[in-house]
Amino acid sequence: MYKMFFSIIFITFLIGTSCKNRIDKVTSTNSHIFNDSIYVLYPEYKIGDSRRYGVFPDSTFNNYKHPNTNMSRMHTLIDFAQDYDGTIFFSKGYYKSNLIMDSKQNIDFKFDRAEFNLLHITDEKGQPSSNITLRGTLILYDRLGTYNSHNIKIDSVIIKSNEFRNLANQKSRGCHIYKGTDTLSIKYLEVQDLASAGEKYKNNHAALAIDGLRKNPTHVSIDEVYIKSSDRHGAYITGSNHIFRKIKIEKYAQGTAVGMTGMQDSDPGEESELSGLWINRCNDCQFDNIEINTKQSKNHYPLKLDEGESSRPTFIDTLALDVKYKDNLVLDNVLTNILVKKIITVD
């Protein structure tokens, strides 16, 4: 009888504790929902929907001041996202604004092919941006840029030119993963074009540039890179401990190197030798499959294999070219640390 009484008391305690935990959780959740009220402009949209906070696709008001924060609606939403323990959703359409994440932490966005001008993830406000998660497909009309930031995860990003949608009425500046970037992963990166010619494009070096003199990016992982066209280099990669599952470069050297500035980690003049893929000072890196089409990029190097640390080799498992391999197709430095395991010809 005593054991039965004790069991009843114990079970009652467990149920009570479970209910208390549930009540605490609900209270916490309700408190969190309540706390978004200062940001809410359109309460008919559910929490986490960008439209709830006044950020709409195909709207001219996203850069207007939020009445409760005195900052732009877009800026306000990014600030709110740091405190919101959930995902902010952007529906399909063109937002006519930038995604600027300067010293931001714990951002979780999801895009349904949402279109923006550019995305920058930096330490401009004094500390690295970190723990940035971007789900779905994001479309940009200027550039994706990162520096001095870490723990960034991106599902899919497409960068393309549209001078009517670019806020500066310019063409694409591609993807630039710059100094101090560490632990960045992208599932799919597509750069449709990179512009050249003129002062405004002088720092356009490659459709995908990963560099940063003396503070090169580390632990960059990209499942698939597709470079449709570049006026200059297709891709320029430096740094360490990178992993690339697939890189396809369709066209490169489609424009001019005239007026282009020098490139970090390279010797003066090397930048003008345009190439499909230039790997330089790249240590402990892995490239599974590289495909470079050369027929529309004649008189330029498909591949440049530059110097690196011999004790930290970089490997290319398979190099596919659309022409039969010849030694003069590759410009290799005598100090290169890059080993190409297999070369094949594709149509």
Image (tube, grey):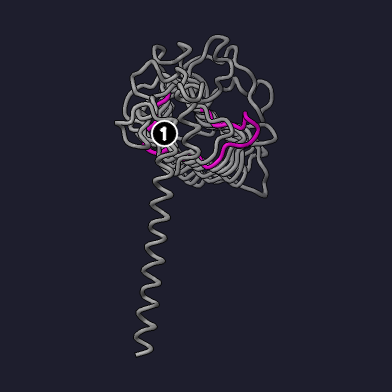
Q: Residue furthest left?
A: 44
Residues rendered magenta in the picture? 120-140
| Front residue of this view, candidates 248 and 170 | 170
Q: Quadrant of residue 272?
A: top right
Of the 4 image quadrants, the one containing the C terminus is top left
Of the 4 image quadrants, the one containing the N terminus is bottom left
Left or right side of 251 for 183: right
Q: Residue furthest top?
A: 198
Coordinates of residue 69 in the picture (x, y in percent): 50, 25
| Front residue of this view, candidates 88 and 13 | 13
Coordinates of residue 289 in the picture (x, y in percent): 44, 42
At label 1, which amino acid type do we have? Ser
Classify mark 1: residues with Cα within 10 Å, few (<14), some (14-19) or many (20+).
few
Q: For mark 1, give the secondary structure.
A: helix
Coordinates of residue 49 in the picture (x, y in percent): 35, 33
Q: Residue furthest bottom?
A: 1
Coordinates of residue 295 in the picture (x, y in percent): 41, 24
Residue 339 is a magenta residue: no
Q: Which residue is mark 1?
A: 37
Q: Is residue 8 above or below residue 313?
A: below
| Front residue of this view, candidates 216 and 40 | 40
